[in-house]
Image: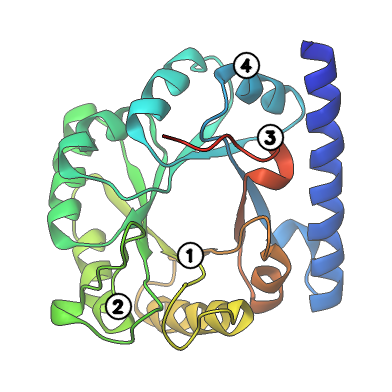
Amino acid sequence: MTDDRRTELATNLARVEDRISAACAKAGRPRDEVTLIVVTKTYPASDVRLLAELGVREVAENRDQEAAPKAAECTDLPLTWHFVGQLQTNKVRSVASYAGIVQSVDRARLVTALSREAVRAGRELGCLVQVALDVESGAAGWASTGDRGGVAPDGVPALAEAIAGAEGLRLDGVMTVAPLAGPYAGRQLAAFERLMEISTDLRATHPAATMVSAGMSADLEDAVAAGATHVRVGTAVLGVRPRLG
């Protein structure tokens, strides 16, 4: 069965690689400007191990209760773990023990908690500001978007400053999920282009914050066209995941 699964994953990875390469060519971008992050949520550590054997180096999870034991099983692998889900402060200590990058930083309280636990663990955590594009502004820059989270665009500068000034944290850039509501609903390319504008503004004051994480299985081409540096692909690599109860 493992051989069958390995073949399936290899085939899917090759297909996704072809899509990314074609999107880069169409956008006039070198292929090495775009990094694939495979979202392994709901899939077992055995799949992560197969992916590592197939050359994957970046994997993502969105629930700590699933990610922590999976990361623990895979400590011998040369992987960077990205945390991409909404993060509650009571899970920060656990996440800070294995994640290399937290992509879903969306409020000052989370920055404080991440900084404290990164220092405690003796680690440096990369952080992305998660931008909510279903609104342009929000109370104190905070936009609550159901289960997706994110800070409104006008709240990005202050949150970025908080990350950049926090011990144990490194400001790496910005992330978004294509919005389901608001002016960019159903307009993924426009949404990702807006994220690039936000990234450009951020890099004016934080030149090292070059990471732009956008695009998933269905819309990675739009993300590459807009200029994303990282795409987060789950279903197209691992298959349609079972519904969580």
Q: Nearer the viewer, mark 2 or mark 3?
A: 2
Between the C-alphas of marks 1 and 4, the distance is: 27 Å
Check if mark 1's residue and mark 4's residue have beta carbons within 8 Å: no
Q: Which residue is mark 1?
A: 177
- The residue indicated by pointer 3 is 56
Q: Earlier in the sequence, mark 1 or mark 4?
A: 4
Of badges 3 and 1, nearer the viewer stands: 1
Number of numbered discs: 4
- Horizontal and vertical percent for residue 11? 87, 36
SS for callout 1: loop
Q: Residues within 10 Å of mark 4 (few under 14, many from 20)?
A: some
Q: Residues within 10 Å of mark 1 (few under 14, many from 20)?
A: many
- Residue 176 horizontal/vertical position (percent): 46, 66
Of the numbered discs 4 and 3, the one sitting upstream in the chain is 4
- Residue type highlighted by circle 2: Ala
Three-letter code for the amino acid on which mark 4 is drawn: Ser
In the picture of the structure, the residue carrying the numbered disc 4 is: 46
Per the model, the C-alpha gap separating discs 2 and 1 is 13 Å
Q: Earlier in the sequence, mark 3 or mark 1?
A: 3
- The relative height of residue 1 versus residue 185 in the rendered view (above or below) is above
Q: In front here: 93 or 177?
A: 177
Where is residue 223 drawn, in percent x and y?
64, 70
Q: Which of marks 4 and 2 precedes in the sequence? A: 4
For marks 2 and 1, the one nearer the N-term is 2
Q: Is residue 112 left or right of residue 124?
A: left
